[in-house]
Image (cartoon, rainbow, N blue to C red):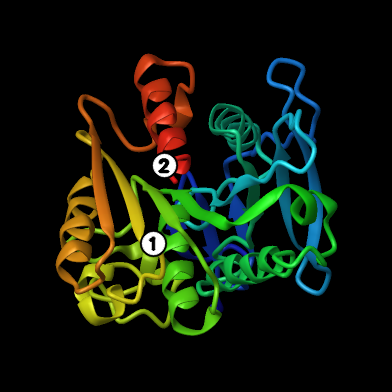
Amino acid sequence: MESNDSSEVVHDFYPRFRVYKDGRVERFRRVNIVPPSDDPKTGVQSKDVVVSPETGLSARLFRPPIPNPGQKLPLLIYNHGGAFCLESAFSSVFHNYLNSLVAEANVIAVSVDYRLAPEHPIPACYEDSWAVTRWVFSHSNGGGPDPWLNRDADFDRVFLAGDSAGANIAHDTLIRAGSDGGMKILGAVLAHPFFGNDEPDKLWACICPDSSGVDDPRLNPAADPTRLSRVVCRMVMICVAEEDSLRERGVTYYEALRTSGWGGEAELVETEGEGHVFHLFNQESERAVTQLKRVASFLNRV
């Protein structure tokens, strides 16, 4: 008797998703999408832009109040987390977080809404982050398509950031920019980076079918110090949490980056008694606010 391809499960990652033999993907988590806004509390404005109509790639831009005409602000390119397969730059979680960070740090932010796995396996997310980064830098001479970036962004103070999978994606962009981008990126913030562990990761194998395994440098950058040394920026903050299962690889990344021949300044920030991306789940908690202020200070260091 032939199997029913429409009901046979080939990958089961409940409560994230299931993949069926006929290619259908069933998702279980609903994302609370919110529109861009003019936030009355902080004065931060946001809007959405289409970067690539061909792929549907888009981003959400955030701008704080700018009382002095002609003032240039640091520019942050942000990649959201979600295990490469969940969440959105337009979700309430990341909209609220970027709104708060932009207000606290007084920066312009571009939040990347990259394509998600498994429908779009890795490297689609890397390609999307790279495309948005290139789009952002098309404004560096004041001639890009978006007036906020042309007028208000300081392209001598550009930062990349992300949490969890987004931190992994930000790292990949740092490597690409150092290899063939010709872009000036000052620093990066990698919060609770998704760099795997010493055990085979079934989710990673599913969403990155061409992976070489636990030592794939895209998953574990420390496995290839030569590639790691090509990180393009001159300062990196790595945030880890004591009770996060991904903590050890975050610490290993910090140590490997410092000894790789990179030559920049690496800073490790650890929060005791907290788990993975705690600062997103309860954004008004004391420790979340402390981390937010730490990141904001980093973005204004120069």
Residue 100 percent across, percent down from the top left? 58, 27
Q: What element carries label 2?
A: loop
| 196 lies left or right of 179 | left
Q: Residue 301's quadrant in the figure?
A: top left
CA–CA distance in space, label 2 to label 1: 37 Å
Where disc 1 sits, the SS reads: helix
66 or 249, nearer to the observer: 66
Is 258 rendered above or below residue 262? above
Q: Is residue 83 above or below residue 279?
A: below
Considering the image in quadrants, where does the N terminus appear?
Answer: bottom right
Identified at 42% across, 54% down, the residue is 188
**Disc 2 residue crowd, few under 14, some 14–19, many 20+, Cα 10 Å:** few
Marks 2/1 in contact by CB < 8 Å: the verdict is: no
**Snapshot quadrant of residue 125:** bottom right
Q: Which of marks 2 and 1 is in front?
A: 2
Crowding at mark 1 (Cα within 10 Å: few <14, some 14-19, many 20+) = some
Q: Mark 2 points at which residue?
A: 301
Q: In which quarter of the image is residue 278?
A: top left
- Could you tell whether 24 is left or right of 37 in the image? left
Pick the residue in front: 287 or 274: 287
- In the rendering, at what x and y percent does residue 279 appear? 42, 29
Judged left or right of residue 178, residue 5 is right
Q: Position of residue 89 (x, y in %)?
A: 64, 46
Task: Please give the residue where the numbered disc 1 appears in the rendered image.
Answer: 203
Three-letter residue code for mark 1: Leu
Q: Which residue is drawn at 77% across and 17% down?
A: 40
Which percent across, then down, holds residue 217?
30, 75
**How many labels, in total?**
2
Residue situated in front as seen by the camera: 196 or 253 = 253
The earlier-in-sequence mark between 2 and 1 is: 1
The kind of residue tagged 2 is: Arg
- Label ID, residue 253: none
